[in-house]
Image: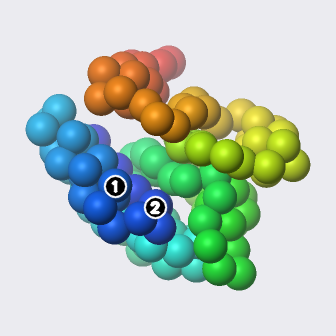
Amino acid sequence: MPRIMVAKDNIISSMDLEELLSARGHMVVGVAASGMEAVHMGETLSPDLIVTEINMPGTMVGVAAAEAIRSTRDIPIFFLMGDAREELVNRAKRMTPHGLIRKPFGEEQVAEAINAAFSAP
């Protein structure tokens, strides 16, 4: 069963995403509410995939957390984005993520993107 870590600052939407992933047969191994927490969880939980907000409040935005995690582990990353600054979007694209999903997104869109990541060669 794929191990997925979620990094979102909104607790309600994190719970919704966790429920969606679990219902689709994925194991959510952790939910981080900040970039710093995401880096710690990414290093200690060894997820198979990370789904993160591109922009999170605090000292480390989601894309910076993803860069830090990728510096030590080659792990697929999906970015979720709402009104993200162009600078952050371009920074995320340079990481060659497995997906950039714009909000609002549907359950099928997320499920298809994650299934595609696990079936990619």
Give the alpha-carbon distance from disc 1 to disc 2, as whole Å.
8 Å
Q: Residue at x 47, y 19 (%)?
A: 120
Residue 3 position within the rendered picture, expressed as x and y whole percent measured from the top left: 30, 50
Q: Position of residue 84 (x, y in %)?
A: 71, 48
Neighbours of disc 1 within 10 Å: few (<14), some (14-19), many (20+): few
Element carrying mark 1: helix
Q: Quadrant of residue 2?
A: top left
| Residue at image coords 55%, 53% | 53
Left of 11 or right of it: where is 53? right
Q: Which residue is mark 1?
A: 13
**Residue 46 vertical placement versus 36 (above, below):** above
**Residue 36, position in %: x, y?**
58, 79
Image marks 1 and 2: residues in contact by CB distance under 8 Å: yes
| Type of amino acid at the residue the image marks with label 2 | Lys
In the image, which disc is placed on residue 8?
2
Q: Of callouts 1 and 2, which one flags the residue occurring earlier in the amino acid sequence?
A: 2
**Which residue is more in the foreground, 82 or 5?**
82
The type of residue carrying mark 1 is Ser
